[in-house]
């Protein structure tokens, strides 16, 4: 007996080892696709020249990694100057510090940033939640030179808006709407400050942003200005300005000029926050800054073209997508078997059939689970009732099963049609609920009920459902199907787990309860 | 009276200390090790078991007929004849399922032990469901045994409700290990199967006296329906039963089986079947775990001689 235990453990260890090696090789040699379809790469170039170098230093705000924009590559070249990259608390991002090197008359700083934009495919991801300290809140509520808080037009307009919009969230929308409707971009000399823009009803984009910020700050809503570049090809890009407002625990972007409220398209690349200068000088240093943006074609290695040749057999993700979905489902089946084995052999729960719970769970994962549950219980209920009536007719086994399967199919079809009538069309995969499994479950439920009573039958049904629910929740864990598809060697770990359960000779959990009276006496 | 438990569960080490054998350990260390798969048919099919018993001179209920094909149902009346009492059972049934006990016949109508009246057609349908595999292990097509009805011994009058009690003896490597008297209850619908709610009392192997008791995995001392004490009775012909169990286990050649024996009021013990996966509630009935008893037989000094007799038994089949 012990030998077999040892053999099983040894085989399990070997399986785990092989699985780990396979997974390791895959991770090492797999070319992960860096760019997906729909992603774009833009090159932003800073060209800062210093006609006559003097004492002082220059701070240039540069782009940083963000959830939807990543710096793929950056390069700096400089002449007559010395630079360093640091994180700044002032611009809330990265900055290049530029210091003249003694002895040079002229200097030049060229920086290139390849920015990878990846649209969020999953859903509109909300901006990250942050908490503002009391200091920060005070900072973002302060008055500034061009953001006047107590000027008559600001107070006037705010009082009007406040009376129309009682809540803070509504007020914010009101402020945005007011600014986009009443501050126009006409005329030659447009003001860039809040009061001027509000008073005259015209303004530059910066003036519009500042007007909005002034109104927000007056209404005690923290707000700040953001400077950045819209990523569209241009040899002479100009910084664009918009407002960021702190609302519902997150900084949300508002662009009065373009009418974006709450969030900006990812092509607007923020560079500097709470300030308008991309490049600022400390000291009497003169400079000329030019910016350009152009779209570049990504290098083939970035796109992660599929590996050709024999070894591509090991890569299931090269298969057509519909095939991948089905394969992922198949690959989840052993995991379901592992869960079922755990429940039956270690916990000691009884179920109808070995694979029934797992297959039910997979059916629910394929279908929308709400429709699945409704259809499941209707089919089970009708089936059990029909089987009860059938037992009076005394039919032979195969014929009886045939009739139950007919009932189940009819039920399923009616349910789909009825749901569709009420506008709740279930997905086609809802029909994938294992018909045969349900039929056998109905038959076994009735036999158990007849032989061991309804109490026992419902107990086993409950056990089946408990295991099915567990399978459902484990198997639908996000990304699990992708993991089993990417790493089919995970199956070896599952097999090792099954081996261990298969040689588990300890008490089942339910036996601690079952045999308690022996200990008692 | 049911013994009220103070504990709601036992810790694994408590069970281990009492030597309780669990399902996993029984399967892995005893059934898989000692019961070769190829021998299962000898125990799973009662027609085969009966023929082995007959060859070995082990008493069994008299077989009236074995029905193997649907075609034979046409001459069912002929097979049954004018027998007043008989039992219809699936050859590969489990847990007493599909067994129909007829206790009287009048004008082609049969009275069952449960008091129902069935016609020849009803009987034919029942037999056909057995043949189609409704009650057999794994749903395989089955055979039907029509055999002598066992008249329960008067000793069991107040101990069994609605059915025939039987003795379950667990034989390990040719030695009886533990035994119980299984008593049908109302809940078990007359079947002597613990899973279906039957009660049982332990049996002292050397004296044949009953003690302890179990019902639905709880310790009891009296029959749940009649309230009669289930301990303190001496089973008649106990020695013969032990011999029959030993003999059958050796003939079948399996190392761990449960032998079910009934006691007929007139003819004495008769072996009903051998069970290749005997249940574990017998430990509760006996208030003792199986492991210490099994380990005595498994001791190395004994093992060799035991093994020899065990192997010779297997070869005799």
Image (cartoon, coloured by chain):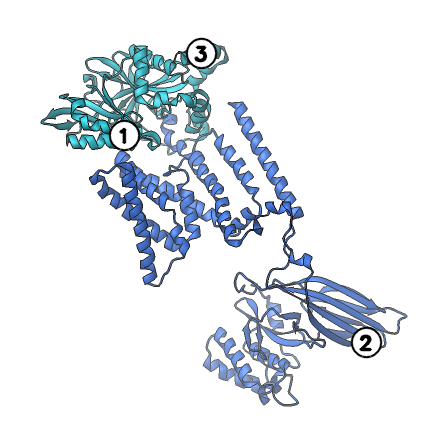
Chain colours: A blue, B cyan
Nearest the eye: B15 or A32: A32
Q: Nearer the viewer, mark 3 or mark 1?
A: 1
Residue under the point 46% across and 81% down: A164
Out of A349 and B132, give the one closest to the viewer. Answer: B132
User: Is residue A368 shown to the viewer in this render?
Assistant: no
Mark 1 chain = B
Q: Is residue B105 left or right of residue B302?
A: left
In the shown orientation, is residue A237 left or right of residue B84? right
Disc 3 marks which residue?
B306
Spatial separation of the CA atoms under disc 1 and disc 2: 103 Å
Name above or below for residue B83 compared with residue A45: above
B87 lies above or below A274: above
Question: In the current view of this chain or complex, which residue is farthest to the front?
Answer: B71
Q: Residue furthest left?
A: B107
For discs 3 and 2, the disc positioned in front in the rendered view: 3
Residue indicated by mark 1: B131
Q: Secondary structure at mark 1?
A: helix
- Asked if one can make out residue A418 in the rendered structure from this viewpoint, the answer is yes
- Element under disc 3: helix
Image quarter of residue A97:
bottom right
The reply to whether discs 3 and 1 touch (Cβ–Cβ < 8 Å) is no
Q: CA distance from mark 3 to mark 1?
A: 40 Å
**Left or right, A443 with reference to B101:** right
Q: Residue at 52% of width from left, 76% of height from top?
A: A172
Q: In 3D space, how far apart are the residues under numbered discs 3 and 2 (Cα atoms)?
A: 103 Å
Residue drawn at x 40%, y 12% is B313
Mark 2 lies on a secondary structure that is loop
> Do badges 3 and 1 share one subunit?
yes
Percent across and percent down for residue A324 are 52, 50
Residue A105 pos. (x, y %) = 88, 74
Q: Which residue is mark 2?
A: A285
């Amino acid at each position: 007996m012990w030998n077999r235990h040892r053999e099983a453990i040894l085989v399990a260890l070997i399986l785990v080892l092989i699985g780990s090696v396979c997974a390791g090789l895959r991770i090492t040699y797999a070319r992960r696709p860096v760019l997906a379809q729909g992603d774009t790469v833009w090159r932003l170039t800073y060209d800062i020249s210093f006609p006559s170098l003097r004492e002082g230093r220059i701070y240039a705000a540069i782009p940083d990694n963000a959830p939807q924009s990543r710096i793929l590559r950056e390069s700096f070249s400089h002449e007559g100057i010395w630079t360093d990259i640091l994180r700044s608390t002032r611009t809330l991002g990265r900055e290049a510090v530029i210091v003249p090197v003694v002895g040079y008359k002229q200097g030049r700083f060229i920086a290139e940033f390849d920015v990878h934009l990846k649209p969020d495919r999953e859903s509109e991801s909300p901006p990250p939640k942050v908490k503002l300290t009391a200091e920060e809140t005070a900072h973002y509520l302060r008055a500034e030179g061009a953001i006047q808080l107590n000027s008559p037009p600001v107070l006037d307009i705010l009082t009007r808006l406040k009376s129309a919009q009682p809540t803070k969230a509504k007020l914010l929308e009101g402020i945005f709407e007011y600014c986009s409707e009443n501050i126009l971009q006409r005329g030659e000399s447009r003001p860039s400050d809040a009061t001027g823009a509000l008073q005259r009803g015209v303004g530059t984009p910066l003036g519009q942003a500042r007007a909005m910020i002034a109104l927000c700050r007056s209404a005690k809503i923290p707000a700040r200005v953001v400077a950045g570049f819209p990523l569209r090809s241009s040899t002479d890009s100009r910084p664009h300005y918009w407002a960021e407002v702190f609302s519902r625990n997150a900084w949300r972007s508002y662009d009065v000029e373009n009418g974006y409220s709450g969030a900006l398209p990812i092509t607007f690349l923020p560079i500097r926050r709470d300030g308008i200068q991309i490049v600022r000088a400390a000291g009497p240093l003169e400079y000329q800054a030019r910016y350009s943006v152009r779209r570049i074609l990504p290098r083939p290695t970035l796109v992660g073209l599929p590996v050709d040749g024999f070894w591509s057999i090991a890569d299931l993700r090269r298969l057509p997508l519909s095939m991948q979905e089905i394969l992922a489902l198949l690959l989840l089946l052993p995991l379901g078997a592992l869960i079922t084995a755990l429940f039956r052999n270690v916990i000691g729960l009884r179920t109808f059939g070995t694979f029934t719970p797992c297959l039910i769970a997979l059916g629910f994962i394929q279908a929308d689970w709400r429709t699945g549950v409704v259809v499941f219980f209707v089919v089970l209920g009708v089936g059990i009732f029909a089987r009860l009536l059938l037992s009076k007719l005394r039919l032979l086994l195969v014929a009886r099963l045939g009739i139950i399967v007919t009932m189940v199919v009819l039920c399923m079809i009616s349910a789909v049609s009825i749901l569709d009538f009420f506008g709740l069309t279930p997905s086609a995969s809802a029909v994938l609920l294992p018909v045969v499994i349900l039929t056998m479950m109905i038959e076994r439920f009735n036999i158990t009920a007849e032989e061991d009573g309804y109490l026992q039958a419902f107990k086993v049904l409950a056990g089946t459902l408990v295991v099915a629910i567990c399978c459902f929740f484990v198997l639908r864990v996000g990304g699990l199907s992708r993991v089993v598809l990417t790493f089919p060697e995970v199956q070896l770990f599952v097999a090792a787990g099954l081996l261990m359960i298969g040689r588990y000779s300890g008490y089942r959990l339910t036996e601690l309860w079952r045999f308690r009276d022996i200990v008692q006496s | 009276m049911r013994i009220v438990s103070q504990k709601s569960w036992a810790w694994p080490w408590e069970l281990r200390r009492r030597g309780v054998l669990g399902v996993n350990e029984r399967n892995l260390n005893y059934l898989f090790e000692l019961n070769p798969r190829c021998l299962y048919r000898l125990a799973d099919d009662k027609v085969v078991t009966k023929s082995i018993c007959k060859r070995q001179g082990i008493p069994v209920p008299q077989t009236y007929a074995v029905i193997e094909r649907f075609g034979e149902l046409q001459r069912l009346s002929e097979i049954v004849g004018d027998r007043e009492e008989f039992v219809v059972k699936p050859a590969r049934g489990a847990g007493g399922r599909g067994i129909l006990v007829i206790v009287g016949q009048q004008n082609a109508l049969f009275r069952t032990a449960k008091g129902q009246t069935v016609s020849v057609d009803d009987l034919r349908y029942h037999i056909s469901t057995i043949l189609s595999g409704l009650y057999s292990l794994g749903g395989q097509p089955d055979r039907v045994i029509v055999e002598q009805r066992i008249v329960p011994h008067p000793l069991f009058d107040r101990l069994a409700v609605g059915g025939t009690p039987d003795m379950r003896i667990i034989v390990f490597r040719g030695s009886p290990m533990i035994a119980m008297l299984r008593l049908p209850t109302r809940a078990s619908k007359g079947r002597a199967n613990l899973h279906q709610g039957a009660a049982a009392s332990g049996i002292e192997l050397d004296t044949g006296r009953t003690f302890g008791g179990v019902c639905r995995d709880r310790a009891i001392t009296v029959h749940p329906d009649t309230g009669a004490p289930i301990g303190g009775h001496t089973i008649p012909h106990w020695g013969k039963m032990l011999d029959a169990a030993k003999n059958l286990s050796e003939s079948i050649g399996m190392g761990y089986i449960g032998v079910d024996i009934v006691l007929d009021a007139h003819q004495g013990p008769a072996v009903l079947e051998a069970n290749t996966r005997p249940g574990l509630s017998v430990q509760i009935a006996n208030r003792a775990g199986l492991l210490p008893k099994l380990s005595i037989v498994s001791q190395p000094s004994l093992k060799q001689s035991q093994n020899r007799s065990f192997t010779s038994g297997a070869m005799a089949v």
